Amino acid sequence: MYKKFILVLMIILFLTPLSMAEFPSDVIILDKPSIVKLTDDQLTDTYENAIVEIDAIRTFHATSGFSPKEYKDYKALLKFRLLLLVEIHSRNLELPQF
């Protein structure tokens, strides 16, 4: 009985933090003067990266279980979706409704 209790305690103490670990952010936080110096393309790209990172972090905390590869794949998919939306908007097209 004592061994089972120790085993369960070890699992709780060692595995729980691993599943809740956070992945480092790819976004560099800039100050106002640095933002002003960005070109239009750099500004758009930085904004897109920030939106993707925010959504990926929210989803990560809600599910608390992406592996590092799944997290990067999910962020790539979010970025792809955002780029598609930007292109659809620039062409003045309607979004498909499901």
Image (cartoon, rainbow, N blue to C red):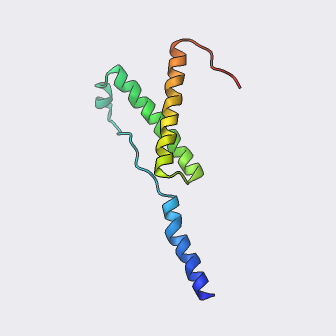
* Whether residue 57 is situated above or below residue 86 in the rendered picture: below
For the image, the number of numbered tags is 0
Please name the residue shown 55% across and 17% down the image.
88
Q: Where is residue 72 in the image (x, y as percent from the top left)?
A: 46, 43
Q: Position of residue 47 (x, y in %)?
A: 42, 30
Outermost residue toward the bottom in this view: 2
Please name the residue shown 53% across and 65% down the image.
16
Dividing the image into 4 quarters, which one contains the C terminus?
top right
* Whether residue 49 is situated above or below residue 18 in the rendered picture: above
Please name the residue shown 60% across and 82% down the image.
5
| 5, 33: nearer the viewer | 5
Please name the residue shown 49% across and 63% down the image.
17
Outermost residue toward the top in this view: 92
The quarter of the picture where residue 2 lies is bottom right
| 59, 38: nearer the viewer | 59
Q: Position of residue 80 (x, y in %)?
A: 50, 30
Dividing the image into 4 quarters, which one contains the N terminus?
bottom right
